[in-house]
Amino acid sequence: MTASVPATAAPAAEPVLRRPSLVGRTRAGLLEALAEIGVPEKERRMRVGQLWNWIYHYGVRDFDAMTTIGKGLRGQLAAHFTLDLPSVTAEQVSTDGTRKWLMRMPSTGPHDRGAEIECVYIPEVDRGTLCVSSQVGCTLTCTFCHTGTQRLVRNLTTEEIVAQVMVARDRLGDFPNRRPPEGAFVPNDGGRFVSNIVFMGMGEPLYNFDGVRDAIAVITDDQGLSIGRRRITVSTSGVVPQIGPLGEEMGTMLAISLHAVRDELRNELVPLNKKYPIKDLLEACRNYPGLSNAKRITFEYVMLKGVNDSDAEARELVRLLKGIPAKINLIPFNPWPGTKYECSDWDRIERFSEIVFRAGYASPVRTPRGRDILAACGQLKSETEKLSARARLMLDEAQADAPAVAAE
Ligand code: SAH
Ligand code: SF4
């Protein structure tokens, strides 16, 4: 059974200029905000530290709660900015405790209703993982992925990426002096409720490199959201030239959407493979900065019936990964309306995983979570696509000004 919380009213397109929110900004972004409202230069750095602490450590929603900042400046800040989070237009809770939020980002211009994105929270007893999006839609067209069929695409801004984490912590009461909602399933190990982040929602994170890098800087800052780099995983379909820089500049864990062991099949499933074939991809993995047995690469492999799930392919998978500190995640395929693929039968998945297990890789099948609320991998697809032709045209117009997305 799915418990659906009634949607809070989404704001209609607003022609008037809204005060921008400070939530999601980098330290440099906050510094700019203070300069804009005329805070003296010698004070700015100290003020950024205070704002940072209130916004990201305490998660306050009101400038008046910022008691270390004088009344005058608080008033000035409130006159020019807000501490708004994106509005949550729907929240769904699965029987297994998984939560999915549909959020609408603030409008970026007179004709933009604001990007609509989904974000999924997967609680376990000793961790809480938030699956975030890096783009609205995806320019890539992996044939088994619902997001890949979406037409509208743009990069999410740094603020929009950070805001997903802020919404999750706010809704879960994961800030000091706050409590989780009644009956919510959250980890009970004494740690934060949102303890891990995976970039496995919509979009290809390495095609939004700068946005993701700056968001990760905010998310990992130990005076704020304070989520360690080893608890963040960036998943890529294989943008080879950006894999080294990802390790150097972000230092997060890496996941590779492999899904096939032969180029011919991978070309079909993950068309980006035509540009960066398996051999080049694995070479980039071998050279991933910081790679060790304690910092392994996760290889994701979606189980498609009669397509990539034979014993021979399992053996080839193990052979290919030899010498790379790796974990293997077998993902049961999540079907969506209109797809030509089916999920492998359970005994086939078991057989495949046994071969992988005997080669020394532990617990490789990822249990599907939140299936009853369509929260699982590859099912996130924004409603924006269902806009009327006219609204879409207006949105396209607004997006002409948005940051360019690396197209294939
Ligand atoms: N673009 C990035 C990250 C987002 S996709 C990437 O491709 O890695 C996150 C994961 O979900 C990827 O491993 C992707 O291959 C997988 N996925 C996509 N559609 C799926 C589906 N229908 N069933 C199961 N996994 C899927
Ligand atoms: Fe894009 Fe990843 Fe989906 Fe491929 S699997 S279309 S890269 S979101």
Image (cartoon, rainbow, N blue to C red):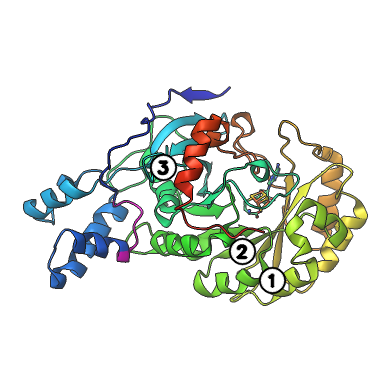
What's the residue type where badge 1 is placed? Cys
- For the residue pair 224 and 337, the one nearer the viewer reads as 337
* Marking on residue 254: 2
The tag earlier along the polypeptide, 3 or 1, is 3
Whether the residues at callouts 1 and 2 have beta carbons within 8 Å, the answer is yes
- For the residue pair 154 and 306, the one nearer the viewer reads as 154
> Residue 102 in magenta?
no
Rate crowding at label 2 as few (under 14), some (14 to 19) or many (20 or more) other CA atoms within 10 Å. many
Q: What element does badge 2 sit on?
A: strand
* Magenta residues, dominant SS class: loop
What's the residue type where badge 3 is placed? Met
Q: Please provide percent x and percent y for residue 169.
A: 39, 45
- Magenta residues, start to end: 22-28
Determine which residue is flagged by label 1.
285
Q: What element does badge 1 sit on?
A: helix
Q: Please provide percent x and percent y for residue 279.
A: 79, 71
